[in-house]
Amino acid sequence: MFKYLYLPIWFLKTRIFGKQIPLQSVVFITDKCNLKCKHCCLYGSDTNHKISTYEEVRKDLEYCYNLGSRFVDFEGGEPLIWKDETNKNDIKDINSLCRLAKEIGFFSATVTTNAQIDFSDCEADSIWVSLDGIGQYHDAIRGEGTFERLIDNIEKSQHKHLSANMVINKLNYPSVKETIQFVKDSNNIKMIAINFHTPFPGTEDLELDWNIRNKIIDDVITMKKAGYPIMNSVSGLKLMKRTDFKKYCWISNFIMVDHSRHAQCQGKEVGMCDRCGFCMAGEMTATMSLKPDTIFAAMKLRM
């Protein structure tokens, strides 16, 4: 019950009284990864990986909770390979962090994974797998054989709240409709979130032509209205056809693996807002504008 009371109180404080209180925290726990994806601009190095300790993550989580955040997403690198072996008699893994988040008071803990290793024992409240197209389209971005391993591990998981995230770029945009259809036909994937590639430095060549992007948004809206399990709301998707709308990206705060703290997406710091592909920006604005379909989608996602 407290969860449902917290949300309207949070809305009053932020929308009515103008306070910028995050609701969701994205905590990067390592930059070590088991893939080298073409769209990734952050984790290409083989050496000098940063891996947060359990106690460092505790401090980060307590900081976020004290700000007002109540939902946490653990990301990487690949968060499923995170371990803290400081105490050989008490080795910590991703499940340790999920339990820690709940002990601190977070309503839910989410893990985003590339699904290249078995995650059937993951205790996160929800799991998001990165699905960037079907077959060759996914492999073209993440490497040969990655799609097959992803499907195998999804089938092993049987997690009740398993969803897919697709980031659309020049390499995989022809596969959008079939990917959404694949999710609809799946017995294991609950829904799919649609995003577009944001051209951070070093990845500009993957940015999608704006006219193609808007055509895809129209197609996704049509499929959403037809009942396909798309997480994005129609109101949020419509906003993403431009990006000059007022943004409320402070609803999510970010803790990087070096423990630097950011009140909102780092895209703003590097001037990416007018080329943003993170559809959560549209969802946040539609939520703060009290769009019913977006509020329903947010409640379904988080509660």
Image (tube, helix red, strand yellow):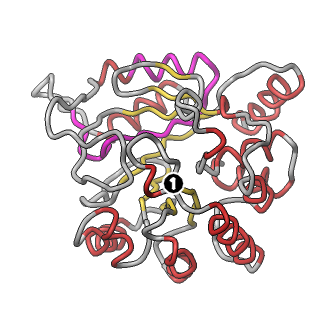
Q: How far across and down, in percent of the image, does residue 236 sit?
A: 75, 54
Q: Is residue 74 magenta?
A: yes
In the image, taking residue 232 as reference, residue 25 lies left or right, namely left
Q: Residue at x 32, y 68 (%)?
A: 150
In the image, taking residue 55 as reference, residue 261 lies left or right, namely right
In the image, taking residue 27 as reference, residue 262 lies left or right, namely right
Q: How far across and down, in percent of the image, does residue 156 sit?
A: 31, 70
The range drawn in magenta is: 58-83
**Nearest the camera: 187 or 21?**
21
**Which residue has dot 1 on it?**
197
Question: Local crowd at mark 1 within 10 Å, few (<14), some, or many (≥20)?
Answer: many
User: Where, quadrant-wise, is the N terminus in this rendering?
Assistant: top right
Q: Is residue 190 magenta?
A: no
Amino acid type, residue under disc 1 in the picture: His
Image quadrant assignment for residue 48: top left
Can I make out residue 163 in this image?
no
